[in-house]
């Protein structure tokens, strides 16, 4: 019991350190998400999205998606998930379509930044970009085959009301849905930032990494990369870039080993934050979690098998 006040103080400090980061994300959300989501609604209102969908429907129909879903996927390739979600919430989707699209975007988002990190630690930039886009479509094919057919609407779409017939209705619907989305994401991100600070404060990151070492062998990864794997899945590839680069530059991980880790994390990273963003929107945790984890494991073991055959 005497230790309890000290623990409470440490937890309180974790919260204090997390709040500024959460507030900065809130400001960033307002600057990025609102203009993008409004722009997409305007393009949809004037018919540009429908025109784009007409061209892309034949391609995306093979993976169980409509053509306008391509706009979301293209956004995810160049930007982080937050603006991608903003675009996603402007479209009329079923929960099945949203699940497939969510997994595609979880694999292929913010590629210029995240693939630059991968390049810095041993993976050719162009190759890792192509790999992640390929795995996005592979995941969509798998999910389109496994997911039962359903017309259940994507939950965030039900808040959009009827289709906007005037500019006033469009603006009102955009403002309403954007505010709900921002509040939801800020609450989740704040909780995750606090959790991250708590793990760091009490030294649990290294302890968990040690426990996960046997799991790395199952994934086809070197046992010494457990901290790197944990970092990529707790704070993401972009936020964890410094740790990843440090592991390679200090010789704790070879570039070949880092290349395997990069391909695994390219498919399955930020399992905590990114997954919960979509779960909060009504998408099944297990479909988006297990699909990426299993495909990442398959990808790494396939790479190892091909390399062994070439030797």
Image: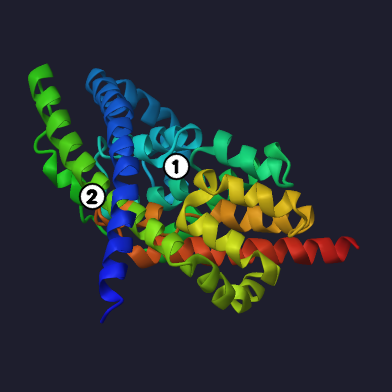
Tell me: 91 left or right of 216: left
Whether 200 is drawn above or below 157: the answer is below
Tell me: 29 left or right of 181: right
* 87 or 20, nearer to the observer: 20
Q: Secondary structure at mark 2?
A: helix
From the top left corner, tell me how far across and down residue 243 is, in percent: 60, 51
The residue pinned by badge 2 equals: 187
> Which sits earlier in the primary sequence, circle 2 or circle 1?
1
Name the residue furthest right. 311
The residue pinned by badge 1 equals: 60
Q: Quadrant of the C terminus?
A: bottom right
From the top left corner, tell me how far across and down residue 290 is, in percent: 45, 67
From the top left corner, tell me how far across and down residue 17 is, in percent: 34, 48
Say which residue appears at 38% left-offset and 29% top-offset. 54
Say which residue appears at 43% left-offset and 33% top-offset. 75
Name the residue furthest front. 2
Q: Secondary structure at mark 1?
A: helix
* Res. 148 visible in picture: no
């Amino acid at each position: 019991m005497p230790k309890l006040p000290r623990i409470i103080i440490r937890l309180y400090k974790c919260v204090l350190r997390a709040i500024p980061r959460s507030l900065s994300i809130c400001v960033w959300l307002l600057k990025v998400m609102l203009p993008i989501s409004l722009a997409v609604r305007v393009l949809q209102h004037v018919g540009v999205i429908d025109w784009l969908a007409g061209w892309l429907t034949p391609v995306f129909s093979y993976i169980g998606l409509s053509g306008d879903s391509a706009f979301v996927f293209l956004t995810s390739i160049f930007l982080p998930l937050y603006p991608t979600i903003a675009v996603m919430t402007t479209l009329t989707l079923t929960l099945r379509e949203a699940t497939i699209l969510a997994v595609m975007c979880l694999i292929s988002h913010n590629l210029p930044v995240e693939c630059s990190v991968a390049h810095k630690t041993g993976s050719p930039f162009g190759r890792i970009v192509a790999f992640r886009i390929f795995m996005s479509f592979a995941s969509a094919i798998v999910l389109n085959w496994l997911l039962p057919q359903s017309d259940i609407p994507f939950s965030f779409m039900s808040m959009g009301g009827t289709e906007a017939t005037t500019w006033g209705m469009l603006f009102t619907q955009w403002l309403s849905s954007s505010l709900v989305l921002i509040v939801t994401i800020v609450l989740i991100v704040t909780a995750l930032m606090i959790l991250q600070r708590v793990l760091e404060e009490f030294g649990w990151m290294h302890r968990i990494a040690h426990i996960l070492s046997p799991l790395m062998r199952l994934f086809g990864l070197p046992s010494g990369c457990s901290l790197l794997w944990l970092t990529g899945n707790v704070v993401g590839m972009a936020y964890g870039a410094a740790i990843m680069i440090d592991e390679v530059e200090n010789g704790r991980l070879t570039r070949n080993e880092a290349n395997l880790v990069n391909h695994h994390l390219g498919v399955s990273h930020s399992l905590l934050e990114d997954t919960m963003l979509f779960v909060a929107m009504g998408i099944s945790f297990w479909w988006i979690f297990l699909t990426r984890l299993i495909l990442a494991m398959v990808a790494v073991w396939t790479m190892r098998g091909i390399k062994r055959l070439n030797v």
